[in-house]
Image (cartoon, rainbow, N blue to C red):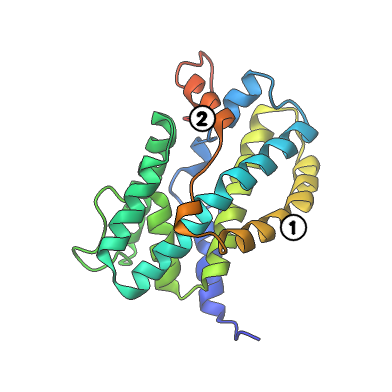
């Protein structure tokens, strides 16, 4: 059994906490448009949406790339860091999704600078994404790769459910039921992600891309994406 490092665990908890001051609460990743379009309107349809985004998005995009980025940080492979950072931006299908990744990345850079936790000068990729900085801090804290991936998926799920509780008639108990239903899927997503080759990576989320694009001109909205 792998020995547990309590400081690494607490570092991961800090990184995925809703209290982390990077403004993640302001983004819904297209979910608000799904509400407006009535694609998602209740607990069951929200479960289907989240399960689909997890299976066809995070599993083949953020989660496997997190592992590659964390390995690149560990090996001090600047070329790989820049490649996967750029790859993530190239796979953001709308202006809002691209902006979210960069804005959260910028916010995390400012926070890490204040905490004296930034990489050494010259090692930060150009236009660093949130995922790239997430991988850096996980590496800096000594978090195991699989735990990094689970933490990222957990933070995504919590943020999506927080957005749903604000915009839908969805209570906190319903949100907890969804967590119970989706927890096993988060673990499975990490297992699948770590079996994928580079050639198999890339999200397949046309519905989310359409919702996100429509959100750019949505008249009334609570979120920035």
Residue 49's x, y, as percent? 68, 36
> Could you tell me which residue is drawn at 51 percent across and 30 percent down?
209
Mark number, residue 145: none
Position of 68 compared to 75: left or right?
A: right
Disc tally is 2
Residue to which mark 2 is pinned: 209
Residue to which mark 1 is pinned: 184
Q: Mark 1, residues whose alpha carbon is within 10 Å: few (<14), some, or many (≥20)?
A: few
Residue 41's x, y, as percent? 73, 25
Residue 35's x, y, as percent? 65, 24
Position of 123 compared to 44: left or right?
A: left
Q: Height in image: 33 above or below 190?
A: above
Q: For residue 75, which quarter of the picture?
A: bottom left
Position of 165 compared to 213: left or right?
A: right
Q: Dot 2: what SS?
A: helix
Q: Mark 2, residues whose alpha carbon is within 10 Å: few (<14), some, or many (≥20)?
A: some
């Amino acid at each position: 059994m792998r020995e547990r490092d309590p400081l690494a665990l607490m570092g991961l908890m800090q990184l995925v906490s809703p209290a982390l001051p990077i403004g993640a609460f302001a983004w819904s990743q297209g979910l608000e448009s799904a509400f407006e379009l009535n694609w998602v309107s209740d607990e069951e349809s929200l479960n289907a949406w989240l399960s689909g985004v997890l299976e066809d998005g995070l599993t083949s995009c953020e989660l496997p790339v997190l592992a590659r980025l964390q390995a690149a940080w560990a090996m001090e492979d600047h070329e790989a860091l820049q490649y996967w950072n750029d790859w993530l931006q190239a796979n953001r299908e709308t202006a809002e999704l691209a902006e979210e990744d960069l804005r959260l990345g910028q916010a995390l850079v400012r926070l890490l600078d204040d905490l004296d936790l930034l990489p050494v000068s010259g090692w930060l990729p150009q236009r660093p994404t949130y995922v790239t900085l997430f991988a850096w801090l996980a590496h800096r804290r000594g978090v195991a790769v699989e735990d990094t991936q689970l933490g990222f998926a957990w933070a995504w799920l919590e943020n999506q459910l927080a957005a749903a509780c604000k915009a839908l008639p969805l209570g906190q108990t319903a949100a907890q039921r969804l967590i119970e239903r989706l927890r096993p899927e988060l673990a499975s997503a990490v297992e699948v992600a770590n079996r994928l080759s580079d050639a198999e990576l890339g999200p397949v989320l046309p519905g989310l891309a359409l919702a996100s694009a429509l959100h750019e001109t949505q008249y009334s909205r609570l979120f920035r994406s």
